[in-house]
Image (cartoon, rainbow, N blue to C red):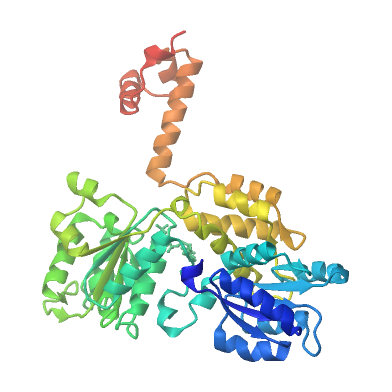
Amino acid sequence: MSDKGYRILLVDDEADLLSLWKLRLKNSGYKVTTALSGEEALVKLSVVKPNVVLTDLRMQGIDGMALFEAIRERNKTIPVIIITAHGSIPEAVEATKKGVFSFLTKPIDGKDLILETEKALQFSIGDTLQQDDSNKWRRDIISKSAAMEELLSRSLLVSDTDSTVLIRGESGTGKELLAIAIHRASSRKDGAFVPVNCAAIPEALLESELFGHAKGSFTGASNKHVGLFKSAHKGTLFLDEIGDMPLQLQVKLLRVLQEKQVRPVGSTTPVPVDVRIISATHRNLEEAIEYKQFREDLYYRLNVVNLELPPLHERKEDIPLLAEYFVQILSGDSKKPVKRITPEAMRILVDAAWPGNVRQLYNVVENAFALATSSFITEDLLHDAIKQHQKKIVPLSEARRQFEQQYLIKLLKTTQGNVSEAARIANRNRTDFYKLLNRHHIIPALFKS
Ligand SMILES: Nc1ncnc2c1ncn2[C@@H]1O[C@H](COP(=O)(O)OP(=O)(O)OP(=O)(O)O)[C@@H](O)[C@H]1O
Ligand SMILES: [Mg+2]
């Protein structure tokens, strides 16, 4: 922690206590600013931009709770720890319901002070650290893991070049989010960021969507259409799911990249374009090249810079931060008490497998949040939510394949490996049925008892 220089704002009207705690925190490597009143704390808040605030509850004027509420009005994310005397524990319990991070009881044990501060820091969301303008570009990417920090600093380095960037990573890891961040960090930020999902647009339309078309160039083309390349002029074009781009179009895309001009469908006049290309895929492009589904020359054009988003289970440190962030988003500006994920529940989140990565984490938190009847999101709520979202969503072709395989296995089990009977139940002729079995590498003999 110490090398990161986290900033702590410490508030109490007793100067002696203040200097004692300050010393302890400083010895642990924190940068500590002190304030002798709630009023002073509010002034210092915007200057020091603390990552955590520790404040006494009972003070003249603005007391601890009022300070907390004033802080919340300005910033939704800074964790606030309240320090109480023995007698005020019920008030402290009320305070946590309102969203105060936790409370410490006087006299404070030095170890507890540090422990609680560290815990709070885990929830101290990017927002506070990232408030300065230089970090604005990455403000939507919540992370603290070394892997993500490394990736983000590489992203920043390449953002201001016009090199093509290829972002890879499993589904739901934040590829699009990163593409947007790179655009924001670049000098093209005032231009448009234009996303295109190459897998979602029918092949017949993709070309005119990308390059535009002249009036009357094909049936239904009544208006002149400039195309996404032109809309992204001086900005960034994000080619999502590039691995799914049809081969024919890959040739045309390559030509655009080489010539820096597009030829609208049905037009002979090329139009110059100044566009930065970021593409993304969850597919293995090298394999696609081997199977002649993806052009190698285009691959090299697109892959000048290669950024890989790690799956969520490889950056577990990010999970508490992301989960708390999602709870905050879900709470919106509602005046209802902020919901908190209990520590036990958080453990479950950290230990889960997350095949659907960050998107799945969001869905699970959203689900549990909706069902929470108290201000705490508990273990059992999360258990249920995770169970519901555990099934990995796969492409339709893969789902069909899995279903077919399971179906055949069940069928052969029932008929104890009798192919004629199995084929009859499946309503297929024997030849077809054998082909099906071969495709799934299923050997009927193994099912004979
Ligand atoms: N580090 C992060 N911080 C905050 N939100 C994130 C983060 N990573 C991903 N998300 C959120 O998770 C969801 C999925 O992210 P995104 O769409 O960028 O993923 P993707 O890799 O493009 O997924 P797919 O391959 O399915 O298209 C989005 O709602 C995004 O805002
Ligand atoms: Mg995506």
Residue 402: name its quadrant: top left
The picture quadrant for ligand 1 comes to bottom left
On the image, the x and y values in percent for residue 55 come to 71, 78
Tell me if residue 66 can be seen.
yes
Q: In front here: 342 or 63?
A: 63
On the picture, is 295 further left or further right than 60? left
As rendered, which of 8 and 436 lies closer to the eye? 8
Q: Residue at (44%, 80%) from the top-left corner?
A: 136
Residue shown at the point (38%, 73%) measured from the top left: 181
Q: Is residue 35 left or right of 64 when viewed as pictured?
A: left
Q: Residue furthest top?
A: 449
Image position, residue 178 (x, y; %): 38, 68
Image coords of residue 376 (percent x, y): 73, 60
| Residue 361 to residue 418: above or below | below
Frontmost residue, 430 versus 179: 179
The image quadrant that residue 245 belongs to is: bottom left
* Residue 221 in view, yes or no: no
- Number of numbered discs overlaid on the protein picture: 0
Q: Is residue 120 left or right of residue 433?
A: right
Residue shown at 31%/80% (left/top)?
186
Query: Percent from the top left, x then y, of residue 163?
Result: 21, 71
| Vertical side of 423 occupied by 238: above or below | below
Residue 289 horizontal side relative to residue 70, left or right: left
